[in-house]
Amino acid sequence: MSAAFRSLGVINYRLWFSGVTVSNIGTWMQRTAQDWVVLTELTRNDAGAVGITMALQFGPQLVLVPVTGLVADRVDPRRLLMATQVIMGGLALGVGVLSLTGILQLWMMYLFALGLGIAAAFDTPVRQTFVGSLVPPTLLSNAVGLNATSFNVARLIGPAVAGLLIASVGSGWVFLINALTFAATMVALSRMRSGELVPVKRAGRSRGQIRAGVGYLRGRPDLVVLFVMVFLMGTLGLNFPIFASTMASTVFHRGAAEFGILSSALAIGSVTGALLAARRERPRLRNVVLAAAGFGFSLIAAALMPSYLAFGLVLPLIGITSITMLNNANAYTQTTTPPELRGRVMSIYIALMMGGTPVGAPLIGWIANSFGPRWGLIVGAMGGLLAAAIASIWWLRSHSVRIRYRGEWRAPFGLETTVRGATPVEVRDPETATTEIAVIESEAQKS
């Protein structure tokens, strides 16, 4: 089996992958329909309303993080996932019926988004950490990458299908179809072989468990920097529904089908990035930094595109860079965190990635309304560029710097004697007759 798909050799993971792929397709269909309904049916192209909807949907992930992480470490993940699937399927069914009967109003959509966000706040950290029960530790990084592949294959298929359905039969049917897809995950969970699940140490009941998770992060400066990067990306950069819907409707004057195609174009790059990440033996922080910078420059390029076709051609690059950054960040966090703390740490990770949306989405929506969607993209690009800059500064301060010169050449700006916090030593190489100004290496963990 190809290195990128080696986790599919495990029967429990194969069941999981199949079920969540079907469910993810329905989820992306619903996200597309939700954004389009708010933008064009419940308002008159109000990007701010789309931002508020996103804030309500992702805000609970930040507010409930002290509870959801602890629940993920304590509760049987299969039972909790079954419960969240029932709740989210019921919400999709309800909004679908309201839409088809013509009763749906904006405030109702806000309540639906909030309810979905509360359910997802419990579902997402368990869904992330449950992978550790399905595959041995040597396959965890690969399984995380394949999870992202499933998510982004769904992003490729779901929006395009949703756009066609909205244009042909109406948005209400999209919500009803999504309600049915939750059954796929429930079937997969029920058919798993309990005896082949990998034992994962669960946290017992004791005082101070939430503080223990936060305390662990304080001792991991690499994770602190990583989480700051994820927060910036989530707050400013990961507002694709606003970017795509406003560019499609107000800049290029296209309809629902073309909006769905843009989302699928973004997913082409995301699938590519996820497969590349799944092939890597282990995640690296430097890949996170490079991908964050590439993401920022890609959004700026998209903002400058003069036509719908040109804009669509840039979107795969945005997809590759964003998923490369997030996949490596996710896998690095999970593979370097003890299993008994993984739920709490991952809940903080997810809260920062999605919890910034209540601030970022309304801000990007306001910018798109006030100055145009292109400026929304440029502000979103700052999330990636700032994240890369912060990580680069941390890396330079915590890693060694080495400068070489031959003969009488001297490094510019006096770098050979002014590296902060380091002691320069002169080392003579008798074979090459060169002199090296070396800096004593710090004890920081290398990425």
Image (cartoon, rainbow, N blue to C red):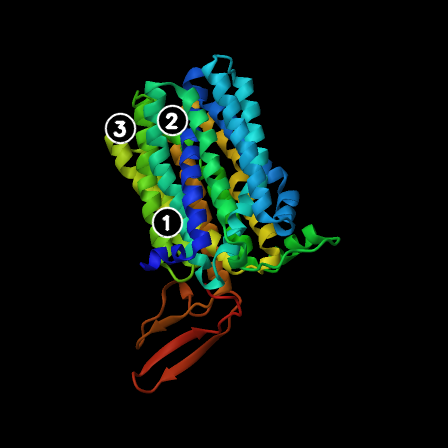
- The span from disc 2 to disc 1 (Cα, nearest Å) is 24 Å
In the picture of the structure, the residue carrying the numbered disc 3 is: 308
Quarter of the image that includes the N terminus: bottom left
Residue at 38% from the left image edge and 53% from the top image edge: 290
Q: Nearer the viewer, residue 25 or 118?
A: 25
x and y, in percent, of residue 441 in the image: 49, 72
- Work out whether mark 2 precedes mark 1 in sequence or the reverse, and give the earlier one: 2
Inspect the image, locate mark 3, and give the three-letter code of the amino acid beneath it. Answer: Tyr
Real-space Cα distance between discs 2 and 3?
Answer: 12 Å
Query: Type of residue at label 1?
Result: Ala
Which residue is pictured at 31% across the width and 76% down the height?
406
Q: Is residue 188 visible?
A: yes
Place of residue 380 in the rendered image (x, y in percent of width and height, measured from the top left): 42, 37
Q: If the image is split into quadrants, where does the C terminus sit?
A: bottom left
98 up-or-down from 61: above or below:
above
The quarter of the picture where residue 117 lies is: top right
Q: Dot 3 surroundings within 10 Å: few (below 14), some, or many (20 or more)?
A: some
Using the numbered discs, state the Cα–Cα distance from disc 1 to disc 3 in whole angstroms.
Answer: 26 Å
Label drawn at residue 245: 2
Amino acid tagged 2: Ser
Mark toward the start of the polypeptide (1 vs 3): 1
Residue 13: x and y, percent?
Answer: 45, 52
The residue that label 1 is drawn on is 274
Task: Residue 144: give x, y in percent of width and height.
Answer: 44, 52
SS of the residue under disc 3: helix
Identify which residue, 10 or 426, lies in the foreground: 10
For disc 2, the neighbor class at 10 Å (few under 14, some 14 to 19, many from 20) is: many
Q: Are marks 1 and 3 in contact (CB under 8 Å)?
A: no
